[in-house]
Image (cartoon, grey):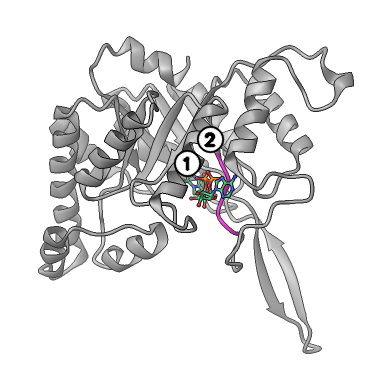
């Protein structure tokens, strides 16, 4: 079932959903599934599974040279999607990246998803491969998510990359894209960033998921701006409950967002991470309640490994 249909079928009642991250290579998938099992009580109709591209490690060799090694630390997105379907009967939403793929590889990847019966994809550019600062597409890959949206939409119309392939059956993906209420870090200014978001929508995106934010006003302003510019598709807020004191510094750096002063003060007053986690849960409950009252279609939680705090929030608000 498509995300947009899940939203329609909910008849205005907010939906609970989550995002999970594949385990570090070699770790047990069972841990991840057991970890999110308690959240099934809140009936998520869909679960996002992130995708992670390669990173480059520079390893000094005994002869003094530097060997550049390509690693994929968290493979397994498609397998996890399949496991989620089988174990929980929930629609998985694999993230599909520009980075690290040629167009042909992307096409094959999408055909796999289609054959698995997956109806939704979240289309993303991907971050620059660590340790680089600028995003570099693979040869014959895409530089921007909007280009990848176009490829998926073409496939939905039965148009594949090469003319001789067009006898293939059309796919039928519901296409999500990312947006940043506090601006994408590379964009010159909010207006430019906004124009490129519009482009993703014009190319055929069906819904938007936001980067995490801790100040609901940023989300409300962003939605108002989208609506004023004629973007009418659902805008799903992404929420991350703060869970350690260190995240006060890390999250703004990693995700380019501002922490509200009230939250900063509350976390700074904590003596340990257990207390900070409680503050994060309380903040998450308040954020969720306000968003729900404002009529958001979905509350989408980034679990980032641990899900007990998300369960505490969901128990209070759903
Ligand atoms: P784009 O929409 O392509 O935008 C990237 C930048 O380019 C922006 O600054 C934009 O303003 C600019 N831009 C866009 N089009 C043009 C153009 N035509 N000309 C010039 N500039 C342009 N990363 C992962 O690696 N794996 C994941 O699973 C993952 N999941 C995510 C889920 C969500 C909900 C979000 C919000 C982010 C996720 N990310 C993930 C991170 C994401 O890949 C990065 O934020 C990335 O830097 C941008 O991706 P995008 O799809 O928003 O890019």
Q: Residue at x 71, y 24 (%)?
A: 111
Q: Within 10 angstroms of label 2, few (less than 14), some, or many (20 or more) residues?
A: some
Which secondary structure type mostly characterizes the magenta part of the structure?
A: loop
Q: Is residue 89 visible?
A: no
* Image position of 235 with respect to 280: above or below: above
Direction bottom: furthest residue: 64
Q: Residue at x 34, y 46 (%)?
A: 181
Q: CA distance from mark 1 to mark 2?
A: 6 Å
Q: Position of residue 245 (x, y in %)?
A: 24, 66
Tell me which segment is drawn in magenta: 124-128
Q: Are marks 1 and 2 in contact (CB under 8 Å)?
A: yes
* Image position of 306 with respect to 265: above or below: above
In reply to whether residue 125 is colored magenta, the answer given is yes
Q: Image quadrant of residue 296?
A: top left
Q: Which residue is mark 2?
A: 199
Label 2, ligand 1: CB separation under 8 Å: yes
> Could you say which is closer to the camera, residue 287 or residue 163?
163
**Label 2 residue SS:** helix
Q: Which residue is mark 1?
A: 195
Label 1, ligand 1: CB separation under 8 Å: yes
Q: Position of residue 160 (x, y in %)?
A: 77, 23
In reply to whether residue 219 is colored magenta, the answer given is no
Q: Residue at x 26, y 64 (%)?
A: 248
Q: In the visual, does 171 lie left or right of 198?
A: right
**Label 1 residue SS:** helix
């Amino acid at each position: 079932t498509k995300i947009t249909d899940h939203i329609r079928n909910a008849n205005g009642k907010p939906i609970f959903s989550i995002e999970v991250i594949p385990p570090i290579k070699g770790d047990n998938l069972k841990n991840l599934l057991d970890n999110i099992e308690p959240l099934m009580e809140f009936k998520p109709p869909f679960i996002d599974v992130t995708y992670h591209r390669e990173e480059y490690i520079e390893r000094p060799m005994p002869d003094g040279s530097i060997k550049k090694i390509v690693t994929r630390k968290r493979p397994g997105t498609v397998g996890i999607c399949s496991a989620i379907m089988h174990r929980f009967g929930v629609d998985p939403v694999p993230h599909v990246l520009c980075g690290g793929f040629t167009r042909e590889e992307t096409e094959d990847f999408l055909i796999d998803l289609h054959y698995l019966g997956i109806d939704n994809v979240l289309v993303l550019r991907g971050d620059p491969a660590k340790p680089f600062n600028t995003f570099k597409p693979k040869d014959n890959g895409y530089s921007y998510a909007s280009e990848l949206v176009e490829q998926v939409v073409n496939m939905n119309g039965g148009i594949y990359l090469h003319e001789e392939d067009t006898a293939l059956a059309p796919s039928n993906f519901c296409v999500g894209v990312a947006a940043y209420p506090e601006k994408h870090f590379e964009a010159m200014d909010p207006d430019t960033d906004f124009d490129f978001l519009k482009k993703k929508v014009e190319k055929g995106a069906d819904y938007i998921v936001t980067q995490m934010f801790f100040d609901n006003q940023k989300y409300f302003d962003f939605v108002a701006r989208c609506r004023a510019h004629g973007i009418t598709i659902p805008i799903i807020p992404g929420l991350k409950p703060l869970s350690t004191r260190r995240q006060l510094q890390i999250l703004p750096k990693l995700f380019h967002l501002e922490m509200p002063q009230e939250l900063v003060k509350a976390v700074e007053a904590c003596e340990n991470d257990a207390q900070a986690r409680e503050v994060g849960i309380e903040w998450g409950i308040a954020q969720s309640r306000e968003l729900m009252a404002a009529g958001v279609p979905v509350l989408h939680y980034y679990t980032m490994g641990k899900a007990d705090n998300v369960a505490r929030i969901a128990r209070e608000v759903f």
